Amino acid sequence: MARFPKINLDITHRCTLQCQRCNRAIFAARNQRVPGEDMTMENFKKVINFFEQIYFCGQISDPIFHPKFIEFLKLLKGKKTVVHTAASHKKEEWYKKAFEANTEAYWTFGIDGLPKDSHKYRKNQNGEHLFKMACMAAKMGLTVKWQYIIFSYNENDIEEARKMAKDNNIILELQKSSRFWEGDPLKPKNKEYYIERKDYENKSKV
């Protein structure tokens, strides 16, 4: 049976956040329903037979909202599993079950800025609750990353975030965005903290 290195799966269509640069915002602006559906267990089992590494990084959804997500994690024991999440609308008990379902999984939490401020971009996110869950995962021995997209409101908090991450055995991953327009209030003032759109577009053509 042929096997491939890795695949990224968008396993549902649900998310409780309203991030301004997310693809979901395009559908909202058009008064359209976000397309997609929950991936079936049958199809999930078919997919994982062909790939060595499974990534859950939704482009229009957050994987934690798939009703069988914990069951998916259990099926992936022994296989590299990477979860990207930013929504915070699950209780602590649910996260504990998810972490226990596959203690070898890698979790990346999208918290842009200090937890108390992350809702400024990730609308509806409870950053403090989500950071608490990230800390719990780290204490349970999972590999945890804190994805921190740099915006104007958080560019001066990076050193404090570094200390918070280090104190909790979490890897801080700074992200520079190219999704800014001229006069964008979210655009960092420090030019080292973003990618000029023209530079990004030129690089993508190479």
Image (cartoon, grey):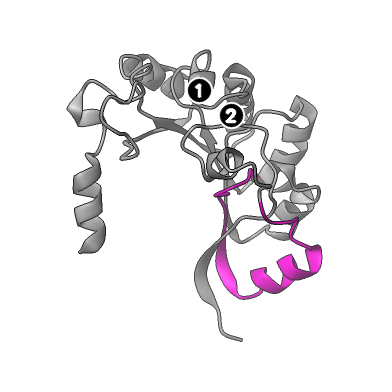
Residue 36 in the image: state x and y as whole percent.
69, 56
Dividing the picture into quarters, in which one does residue 42 lie?
bottom right
Work out whether mark 1 precedes mark 2 in sequence or the reverse, and give the earlier one: 2
Left or right relative to 126: residue 167: left
Identity of the amino acid at label 2?
Ala
Packing grade of label 1 (10 A; few <14, some 14-19, many >=20) is some
Real-space CA distance between mark 1 and mark 2, rounded to the nearest whole angstrom: 9 Å
Identify the residue shown where x is 78% and y is 63%.
40
Q: Residue lying farthest front?
A: 30
Check disc 1 and report its element: helix, strand or loop. loop
Q: In the rendering, which numbered label is found on residue 134?
A: 2
Packing grade of label 2 (10 A; few <14, some 14-19, many >=20) is many
Identity of the amino acid at label 1?
Asn
Q: Are marks 1 and 2 in contact (CB under 8 Å)?
A: yes
Q: Where the N terminus falls, by quadrant?
A: bottom right
Q: Nearer the viewer, mark 1 or mark 2?
A: 2
Q: Where the C terminus falls, by quadrant?
A: bottom left
Residue 15 in the image: state x and y as whole percent.
66, 39
Residue 67 in the image: state x and y as whole percent.
80, 47
Range shown magenta: 35-62
Dividing the picture into quarters, in which one does residue 53 lie?
bottom right
Residue beneath disc 1: 168
Q: Front-most of 17 and 161?
A: 17
Q: Front-most of 77 and 36?
A: 36
Q: Front-most of 68 and 186?
A: 186
